[in-house]
Amino acid sequence: MSINRILVADDEESMRWVLAKALEKKGFSVDLAANGDQAQNLFDRNEYDLAILDIKMPGTTGLELLQRFRELRPDKLVIIMTAESSMENAVTAMKLGAYDYITKPFDLNALDAIILKAQKALDITTEVHQLKTELQEPYRLHRAIIGSSAAMQQVYKIVGKTAASDVTVLITGESGTGKELIARALHYNSRRLGKPFVAINCAAIPRELLESELFGHEKGAFTGATERRFGKFEQAKGGTLFLDEIGDMPLELQTKLLRVLQEKEITRTGGNTTIQVDVRIIAATNQNIAEKIKLNEFREDLFYRLNVVPIVLPPLRERMEDIHDLTHFFINKANEELGVKIQGCCEETMNLLRSYHWPGNIRELENTLYRATLLASDKILAPTDFPDLVPRSTVSEKGASLEDLITGKLNASLAQMDINELDDLYDMVLQQMERPLIKIILLKTRNNQVRAAEILGINRNTLRKKIQTLGIEIKKG
């Protein structure tokens, strides 16, 4: 954690002006208060890393503010200023939790030295807290990463061989296979244990904000940038940055990321100063990056930079022997978190869980078990507690009707959604069925739209409109 935003409270306008100019010149964001009541209001409404308070102000005094601030946010630092260099003031301020004490008039270099010392103290405090937290993580991860299948044993071997180095890793696998768990396992078994593990989902952040999230920005860099902000690279200082869904990163940002990987330095948005960064990069995606490279949607040189060590996570349907252990793990977890007392599953239920194809992988299994444990009427889960599960055998047998196949796929997809939050399900399902149907018929008729319309039983103009609306590409030649 870095000192970024500072609150200055002093009833002397000249002192406020001098401190604001000096601190802003150093790159800090500064808010000013002319008395204790203003300072209290600002503190209640904003987040500050450091407060510099005068002892004697109209209304609430600096010492009273110090006491309140320390009670509300004991992790924040406070420097006390006073024109009276009495021992009583110094002792009282330090007893109440002030980080330091400075006597007016003071040299600005002396204040700079105190702030620098405060930053180092904050870094140490943050690292100690991080270390205490992360020393417990390997145990929790050991419990959370479940699987004795051959496919998972291969994953464990790669993690074991690469965790200690700083090599860049690309984790691929379908959604819900546990990519972030593996990234954390790499971090917590590395020399970077005790430093931050920072994760960012590149698909969840609008592209216009993603650059600022990654690299940070300077005050005034764009509309709404009211203060300097540190990005994920700086937040992960000395630790690991996990770039989830890297396949969704815009091309222009891919170029900047490639430069960071090559030069080990960043520049904040709106800034000119290069900042050295020491982070290990672990990336993950559920997309086919090779296909995106062919479509010019992903830089090939960035792929090679990220894919130094590839880890491929198998889908749950390819490691069904792990269903038993995963099921018991999630039932125990649900018992702890939901306050239920489920003892397990009957054999028929376990067979049902093994026969389902789990398109949502481990995440779907966890959500399904949580729902079943919460709604179950008995301590042993029965097949009736899983009404949405359709065994694979009913949807993949040779000769199964088209309706049965569609029913199985729909059940599997809807099991991952909260249908109460949907209001256009009918149109959404029809569109997802219509598009592949038209594409298949066009392929079989070699893009003969007249013949395709006849087979589909629709007008040629209707077919042309649907091709345009559904975004179906017609390849010539």
Image (cartoon, rainbow, N blue to C red):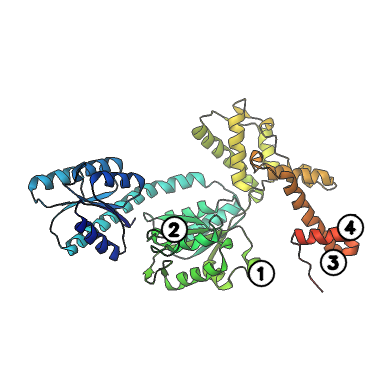
SS class of the residue under badge 2?
Answer: loop
Quarter placement of the C terminus:
bottom right
- The numbered dot on residue 459 is 4
Distance between the alpha carbons at the discs numbered 4 and 1: 32 Å
Q: Residues within 10 Å of mark 2 (few under 14, many from 20)?
A: few
Q: Position of residue 366 (x, y in %)?
A: 58, 41
Quarter placement of the N terminus:
bottom left
> For this view, does 356 lie left or right of residue 99?
right
Instruction: From the image, tell me which residue sits under label 1.
Output: 295
Vertical comparison of 340 with 70: above or below: above
Instruction: From the image, tell me which residue sits under label 2.
Output: 224
Q: Residues within 10 Å of mark 1 (few under 14, many from 20)?
A: few
Instruction: Name the residue type under label 2.
Output: Gly
Mark 4 / mark 1, whichever is N-terminal = 1
Mark 4 / mark 2, whichever is N-terminal = 2
Vertical comparison of 96 with 160: above or below: above
Mark 1 / mark 2, whichever is N-terminal = 2
